[in-house]
Amino acid sequence: MSAPIIDGKQISQDIRASIQQEVIRLKDHQFQPGLAVVLVGEDPASQVYVKNKEKACHDLGYYSEVHRLPADTSQEALLELVDKLNHQSNIHGILVQLPLPKHIHEKAVIDAIAVEKDVDGFHPVNVGNLVIGDDSLLPCTPAGVIELIKRTGVEIAGKHAVVIGRSNIVGKPVSLLLQRENATVTMCHSRTANIAELSRQADILVVAIGKANFIDASFVKPGAVVIDVGMNRLENGKLAGDVDYESVKQVSGPITPVPGGVGPMTITMLMQNTLVAAKRSHG
Ligand code: GUN
């Protein structure tokens, strides 16, 4: 028997529907959440991501600004724009699309975003607050991963979660959020000696290692929840996750497909963060 699919698209739609209700309520109080997205250069994937964010804002009734800047924009000019957006009262969230062109120091730009408008959750103060368990804006993909696990109905507390991948934007924050939910967490990465053996111990397995179909059924304990954060473009143009879905779903419990699992959640959590930031600014 095949495992239940965790339908990220449907869950995402459900969350967006409740965000929309809240936006309508705020509109009655003459208040509208606002998001600014900044794109430097013409990276094709980034252009698609930015368009999707713009559309999500439009669909949900947010105020939205998209700043498309040429690839040769100076760091100084970008920092000036960030500073302007930091002070703009109709903007509650600022997202600078990454990667930035090589001549711009990403860290300098992230550090310049006002902590309370950092809807990516990338600012060191938000990262620090996540580590110590204080209120912060959570990074979108990790927050989406936790939401998907919760919606399976599987209890996280007391479970053994194994996270494969230790990136700053996914693996590390996911492990912190799972600990916050009282899981016992093992971190694996490209240099871990016995990944399959550790992975087989997981009640909850989160994979973000960036290698197509890296995890097959031999890595998975029967019934385990499997969350695949991978998005790998194959030579034939198709999108593949880090998990060999067809093989793993034969043994796993609830599992995310790629596409249609974690992917749709990222922008939804961005919209949620923007709403949270807007409401906090409103008092
Ligand atoms: N590029 C790819 N993913 C992301 C993201 O989540 N945030 C930003 N700012 N840039 C990205």
Image (tube, rainbow, N blue to C red):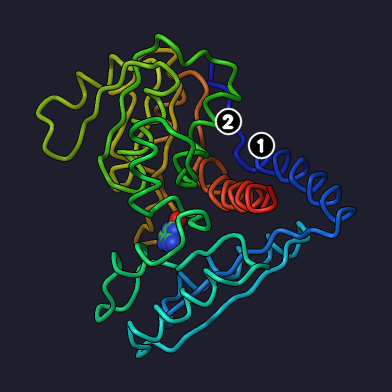
Give the residue type that dot 2 points to.
Ile
Q: Which residue is mark 2?
A: 6
* Spatial separation of the CA atoms under disc 1 and disc 2: 8 Å
Q: Position of residue 59 (x, y in %)?
A: 76, 60
**Is 21 situated left or right of 239 in this image?**
right
**Is 58 situated left or right of 226 in this image?**
right
Q: Residue at x 21, y 31 (%)?
A: 188
- In front of the other: 74 or 143: 74
- Is disc 1 placed on a helix, strand or loop? helix
Q: Which residue is mark 1?
A: 11
Q: Residue furthest top?
A: 158
Q: Position of residue 236 (x, y in %)?
A: 39, 61
Q: Residue at x 43, y 80 (%)?
A: 40
Q: Considering the image in quadrants, where does the N terminus appear? A: top right
Quarter holding residue 7: top right
Q: Residue furthest front?
A: 283
Q: Nearer the viewer, mark 1 or mark 2?
A: 1
Q: Is residue 207 above or below residue 124?
A: above
Q: Is residue 277 above or below residue 59?
A: above
Residue 237 is at least partly visible in this image? no
